[in-house]
Image: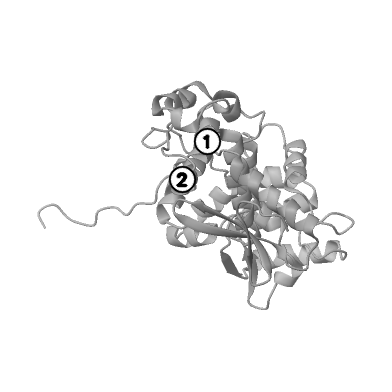
Amino acid sequence: MQKLKGLQLKKRTWYYTVTRNKERKYHLLGSIDAPESEILEAYHKWVAEYDEKKDRLMPLSRIWLAARQREVDDGLLSPKTLNEYRKHLAEHARLNQVFGSRLLDSIKPMEIQEYLDTGKRYQSNREVATLAAMLGWARNRGHVQFNATDGVERNREIPRDRYVSDEEFRIVYEAQPPQLQDLMMIIYLTGLRINDVLNLRFADCFDEWLYASEGKTGKKVRFLWSDELKAVVDRSRRRQPIGEFIIRRVDGKQYKHRHMAKEFRKGFPVGVEDFKLKDLRAKSATDREDPEMASYALGHSSQSITNRHYLRNQKGRLVSALDRAIGS
């Protein structure tokens, strides 16, 4: 084997070694018995990886997204979140159009603020949040020195406040096909996200509860059977005996989120104020008597998230009157 910088044989195994931030790193290339061509190919791949500077948006995003993919593989990050990151960091996306040609350490906080001020309010917040996470990760690993998003004030967001009344629910429910009726009811009765309901299987039905895994947070939750929830699952089982999913197509296969959302819009009746399937999660939380139980059902890490984003004030807060006589 020819002598190359960083190429090291250790215990009958070839490694590419490199020092970064005073730390020695070893990357496996192959065993001593592997063909020389394979070792050299792996060696040059790592050389190219380290030679490419990570001080611009696209080169940095490639290694950052690869690290996030490993988190998805380990069950630490939702695939949906990774897809959002990829969308924000795509070559045609606004972040790359505005900052793609810049050295990341040359970007100033005032430029991030201008990015927020000139873009769509909510979308710009999400894009800058992705950039902030990536720059924080890169700074900790020595790829950049500064995170230009630190201290920048995000656009103010007004929490969605659409409360779906029982009568509105009934009218829309009756206008939908059976699979969407089941979806609407399970979202309302459990508070689960749409994708989590679509992932429910009959194998998740136990004698005492319905077991669910929340894709976004990875949390597990068991819903004790209510008469209503049991009736929805039993009705689905009787109507379509083929397939493992509780909400499923005629051929027994799983529905996709986008398909159900499209069908829901198609069957939405005229005369009812518009709402989305996800608003039924908020209705579920609001209609529960116990806000703490609502937070558990929705899988939130804190009560404040439920209070701010899901409990609908249009129904009116339930407040006890003061039980005290004047002068007592």
**Residue 236 location (% of width, % of height):** 79, 62
Which is more N-terminal, label 1 or label 2? 1
Residue at disc 2, secondary structure: loop
Q: Are marks 2 and 1 in contact (CB under 8 Å)?
A: no
Q: CA distance from mark 2 to mark 1?
A: 10 Å
Q: Is residue 30 above or below residue 95?
A: below
**Residue 292 location (% of width, % of height):** 43, 61
Q: Which disc number belongs to residue 55?
A: 1
Q: Is residue 253 left or right of residue 29?
A: right
Q: Is residue 291 left or right of residue 42?
A: left
Q: How is the image coloured?
A: one colour
* Residue that extends furthest to the right in the rendered view of this protein: 251
Residue at disc 1, secondary structure: loop
**Residue 107 location (% of width, % of height):** 45, 28
* Residue that extends furthest to the bottom in the rendered view of this protein: 207
Q: Local crowd at mark 1 within 10 Å, few (<14), some, or many (≥20)? A: many
Quick one: 290 or 194, which is closer to the camera? 194
Q: Amino acid at mark 1?
A: Asp
Q: Is residue 127 left or right of residue 235?
A: left
Quick one: 28 or 39, which is closer to the camera? 39
| Count of numbered marks | 2
Q: Name the residue tied to disc 2.
A: 142
Quick one: 86 or 164, which is closer to the camera? 86
Residue at position x 39%, y 37% in the image:
150
Q: Amino acid at mark 2?
A: Gly
Locate the N terminus by quadrant. bottom right
